[in-house]
Image (spheres, grey):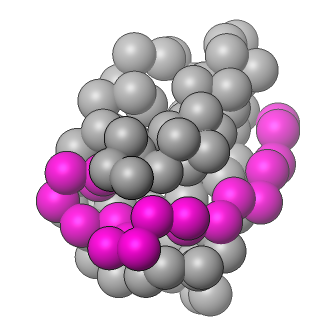
Amino acid sequence: MVEKVLTVKNRAGIHARPASMIAQAANKFVSEITLEKDSIVVNAKSIMGVITMAAGYNTTIVLKVEGDDEQEAVAAIERLFETKFEEE
């Protein structure tokens, strides 16, 4: 299992478009991928789950990935956060 702490860097936070990008990226992998904010844990492959986290600007999220392609999955999702979901 790989754990990574990510920070929401785009000003609008995680709304529908970033949630969709996260879910699309996550669905490319066979690993189990979850996002955790405070006590809320959601499946990263679910757009609605990701939206319900209500993660605003500067929120920290713990990404947890377990499976055969966990390294690649972490890298792909981390890249989305680092590029601010291509919004800025």
Residue 25 part of the magenta segment: no
Residue 58 against residue 25 in the figure, above or below:
below
Residue 60 against residue 43 in the figure, above or below:
below
x and y percentages locating residue 76 in the rendered image: 57, 25
Q: Which residues are drawn in magenta?
A: 1-19
Point 59% across, 33% down: residue: 79
Name the quadrant containing residue 33: top right
Point 40% across, 27% down: residue: 25
Point 35% across, 82% down: residue: 54
Residue 39 against residue 8 in the figure, above or below:
below
Residue 26 against residue 43 in the figure, above or below:
above
x and y percentages locating residue 77 in the rendered image: 55, 36
Say left or right for 67 vs 48. Answer: right
x and y percentages locating residue 27 in the rendered image: 35, 25
Q: Quadrant of the N terminus?
A: top right
Point 39% across, 52% down: residue: 88
Residue reaching furthest bottom?
Answer: 38
Name the quadrant containing residue 55: bottom left
The answer to whether residue 55 is visible is: no
The answer to whether residue 38 is visible is: yes
> How many labels were placed on the picture?
0
Name the quadrant containing residue 32: top right
x and y percentages locating residue 29 in the rendered image: 48, 17
- Residue situated in front as seen by the camera: 24 or 11: 11
- Residue situated in front as seen by the camera: 46 or 77: 77
Say left or right for 62 vs 14. Answer: right
Residue reaching furthest front?
Answer: 88
